Image (cartoon, rainbow, N blue to C red):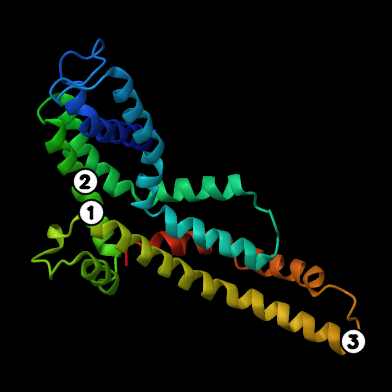
Amino acid sequence: MTAFRTCTRLALLLLLVAVGPALAQEPLALATEAVEGESYSLSIQILVLMTLLTLLPAAVLSMSAFVRVIIVLSIVRQALGTAQTPPNQVLLGIALFLTFFVMAPVISEIQTTAVEPYMAGTLEAPEAFKAGIAPLHTFMMNQTRDSDLQLFAGIAGHDDFASAADVPLSILIPSFMVSELKTAFQIGFLVFIPFLVIDLVVSSVLMSMGMMMLSPMLISLPFKIMLFVLVDGWALLLGTLASSFYT
């Protein structure tokens, strides 16, 4: 619950930073037209707020461990050949809570350095936003490959940065996402190999017995499930995913 409350406060902080200047202008509720380009009507402010609320979950998930976790879990389900088992809702729940577990140190730092000072009134919204985004920036930099960072920096026309803190979010976020996709598929490939071997062995045995009309997937599925259960596959997989962010 503490992590959830912190994430909620961080989301509100991001929204306040984005729409704070507009909300602070006078008049607020009765303005229907812009006055010298400085004030906005309430309907436009609500539109901006709702747009940010729609985009905020995708932005937050893209800057966390969620991308790697959900892709690996989806590949494991595909390798098992169990179609919709576990269902999408279960995979999303596992991915979300594992993401909270991995991001707990980052969330705690955001709570201490940004959310609490802002709620206490000792920091203004822009300063609180900078303090809150710094732990996420560090987390993403630690998980981003230099080659991906150089790729997007070159596309944007930026030279080498003096330090990691100088990398802007406009370059870091896409670089981080590409690195996460690559890492997720690498882990998924390694997980897929044992199940592929079982499929090949079962298919070869069935062909040698002349049972070509029998689906190999039907025979290999219980063997793959048994193997996954015997090695305590879910605990091993989730533990490996969590530890991959700390290496």
Left/right placement of residue 19 relative to residue 37 reads: right
Residue at 33% in and 23% down: 46
Q: Position of residue 148 (x, y in %)?
A: 29, 70
Separation of residues labelled 3 and 2 (CA atoms): 62 Å
Residue at 18% in and 49% down: 134
Left/right placement of residue 207 relative to residue 18 reads: right
Identify the disc placed on residue 169.
1
Determine which quarter of the picture holds residue 170.
bottom left
Query: Is residue 204 something one can see in this rendering?
Result: yes
Q: Position of residue 191 (x, y in %)?
A: 55, 72
Q: Is residue 83 above or below residue 204?
A: above
Residue named by callout 3: 209
Q: Secondary structure at mark 1?
A: helix
Identity, as a three-letter code, of the amino acid under mark 1: Leu
Residue named by callout 2: 133
Residue at 31% in and 24% down: 44
Q: Secondary structure at mark 3?
A: loop
Q: Is residue 124 above or below residue 35?
A: below
Residue contact at pointers 3 and 2, CB within 8 angstroms? no
Separation of residues labelled 1 and 3 (CA atoms): 59 Å
Identity, as a three-letter code, of the amino acid under mark 3: Met
Separation of residues labelled 2 and 1 (CA atoms): 9 Å
Label 2 crowd (10 A; few <14 / some 14-19 / many >=20): some
Which of the two marks, 2 or 1, is nearer to us in this view?
1
Q: Secondary structure at mark 2?
A: helix
Depth check: 31 or 200 in front? Answer: 31
Left/right placement of residue 109 relative to residue 123 reads: right
Residue contact at pointers 2 and 1, CB within 8 angstroms? yes
Depth check: 73 or 157 in front? Answer: 157
Which of the two marks, 3 or 2, is nearer to us in this view?
2
Q: Quadrant of the N terminus?
A: top left
Identity, as a three-letter code, of the amino acid under mark 2: Ile
